[in-house]
Amino acid sequence: MAQYNGIYAILPAPFKLKNVILRAMNFTNPGKSEICSMLRKIRSIAVVGLSPNADRPSFRVAQGMQELGYRIIPVRPMVSEVLGEKAYPDLASVPHKIDLVNVFRAPEHVPAIVEECIALGIKNLWLQDGVIHEEAAQRARAAGITVVMDKCLWRDGGPCGKSVA
């Protein structure tokens, strides 16, 4: 069995792939105890790509974390408010401390978000299910940022059981 980009596959031998590039993913997420420890320390979560549409996963995840007592900071251009909180066009526009950045953007946007986190001194970054950019995650980690990638904050972090309210 081989793992490529987080996907496990049993390939018959010989197996040829045409026009497909597969590479092993070297990034590993922090363990459950480290994730729970991080989530017990934070109070504010900036959600990059937070949709005002209640049917979107970003809205439901942010709403669930808000119900646990976290302050949600919507980061999305051309939106004024989500979940009763003022929205900002980018992380640099947020006037208060950000403890965690939760990303609901396509992977090609992650490197710029990582650079913004580094410039702002943000210490925690969460890339939601399907948001995978190993190079950017490694860059963030090298800059001292705790990174969780390809996991759902609500599903995988919410069960830590902390209510900050």
Image (cartoon, rainbow, N blue to C red):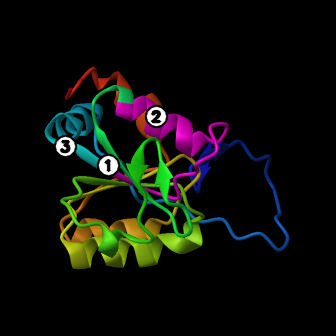
Nearest to the observer: residue 93 or residue 64 = 93
In the rendered structure, find residue 63 and report the number of the disc placed on it.
2
Callout 3 amino acid: Ile
Q: Is residue 90 magenta?
A: no
Nearest to the observer: residue 149 or residue 61 = 61
Q: Quadrant of residue 89?
A: bottom left
Check disc 2: other Cα within 10 Å, few if <14, some if 14-19, many if 20+. Answer: some
Magenta extent: 46-66
Callout 1 amino acid: Ile
Check disc 3: other Cα within 10 Å, few if <14, some if 14-19, many if 20+. Answer: some
Question: What element does badge 3 sit on?
Answer: loop
The CA distance from mark 1 to mark 3 is: 8 Å
Identify the residue at image location x=32%, y=26%. 68
Q: Quadrant of residue 108?
A: bottom right
For marks 2 and 3, the one nearer the N-term is 3
In the rendered structure, find residue 98 and report the number of the disc placed on it.
none
Identify the residue at image location x=81%, y=56%. 14
Residue tagged 1: 45
Quarter of the picture holding the C terminus? top left
Relative to residue 160, is residue 140 depicted above or below? below
Q: Position of residue 162 (x, y in %)?
A: 23, 24
**In the rendered structure, are the residues bearing label 1 and label 3 in contact, judged by CB atoms less than 8 Å apart?**
yes
For marks 2 and 1, the one nearer the N-term is 1
Q: Is residue 62 magenta?
A: yes
Residue 139 visible (yes or no): no
Residue tagged 3: 42
